[in-house]
Image (cartoon, helix red, strand yellow):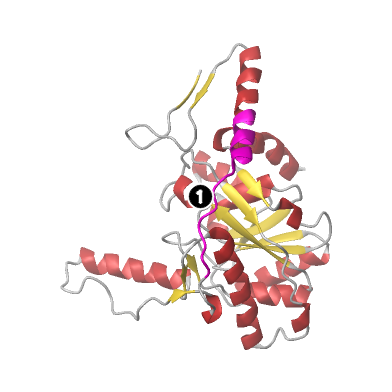
Amino acid sequence: MLYGFVKATLGSALKVFYQPWIRGQQNIPSDGPAILASNHLAVIDSFFLPLMIRREVVFMGKSDYFTGTGIKGKAVAAFMRGVGTIPVDRSGGKASEAALRTGLKRLAEGELFGIYPEGTRSPDGRLYRGKTGVARLALESGAPVIPVAMIGTNIAQPIGRKIPKLHRIGVVVGEPLDFSRYAGMHGDRFVLRSITDEIMYELMRLSGQEYVDIYAATMKNRMAAAKKEAAKKEKDESVAKPPERVGAPGGRPVPEVEVPQPTEDEIREGLERLEAARTEMAARGEELHIDNPDSADESGEPDTTSE
């Protein structure tokens, strides 16, 4: 019930102000289990994807989101619970196994389960090597995997920014991927890697992101180490590291892709929602002033005021 309430209230407000668009929603089955495998650009990925699709989907989120203090911390925790996020300890080992079992339980109940194969947010907007947990989940559950590309959430909410700025956000849903041909092979690490690379290739194709064949967590550690070295003013500006392997998952040919942009119909739909909100507020004697979410003033921030 809380999920539906949050989706009906906050979801409506987000659609007015951010004018999000979605493409390929028909690829999500109307019933039955399915795994939504998404790229991960920002915290708000877990807000907009559940709010933009018709069925309820549950994602896992780091437990830190549920332990905040003060008004802001409690508000974040309440929202995470409202959109169905399940807290998980990301320390690995038994925690990772518990997360997998949580996903399998939900899929066994015929529901949707969301997962970020990269394991953490991209540190620079690129797509990183996927972890094989998504492949295990697919083989042990038998559920199809639906690739989902989030577009523009990293622009609306760069790493370090708590309150997202106004920027049009998109969701591109790909066709379901069936891995039933690998049934019973969830213990084969080569099969798990092949499946994961196939999923990541689809995410690369749908999102238009550049792919880097290392884990996002590894890149974050390198960036943190380089920053620490620079702060100490040592001669070496970064720690020694092997070159980044830019290409496509599993050594596949790199496709010609670009970041999807909203169509005229999708833009018009967003503007119609905005005009409807203006009309509703005018009937109450209120005014709503908001520029296009992709526009900004000289400070780089969109101009939004409400009286």
Element type at mark 1: loop
Q: Is residue 179 magenta?
A: no
Residue 147 seen in the current view: yes
The percent position of residue 25, horizontal first and vertical second, equals: 72, 51
Position above or below: 187 against 257: below
Q: Quadrant of residue 57?
A: bottom right
Q: Nearer the viewer, residue 100 or 207?
A: 207
Q: Nearer the viewer, residue 232 or 69?
A: 232
The percent position of residue 219, horizontal first and vertical second, equals: 40, 70
Position above or below: 54 against 122: above
Q: Is residue 105 left or right of residue 294?
A: right
Which residue is found at the position 55% from the left and 80% from the top? 250
Q: Quadrant of residue 123?
A: bottom left
Which residue is found at the position 61% from the left and 51% from the top? 171
Q: For label 1, count other residues whose C-alpha is less than 10 Å away and answer few (under 14), some (14-19) or many (20+).
A: many
**On the rendered image, what quadrant is the N terminus found in?**
top right
The percent position of residue 220, horizontal first and vertical second, equals: 40, 67
Q: Nearer the viewer, residue 12 or 247?
A: 247
Q: How many marks?
A: 1
Residue occupying the far top of the picture: 285
Question: Looking at numbered disc 1 in the image, what kind of residue is underneath it?
Answer: Gly
Residue matched to label 1: 152
Q: Is residue 214 left or right of residue 136?
A: left
Q: Is residue 265 magenta?
A: yes
Q: Quadrant of residue 135?
A: bottom right
The percent position of residue 199, horizontal first and vertical second, equals: 63, 71
Q: Which residues are magenta?
A: 255-273
Residue 132 seen in the current view: no
Which residue is found at the position 83% from the left and 61% from the top? 32
Which residue is found at the position 36% from the left and 37% from the top? 300
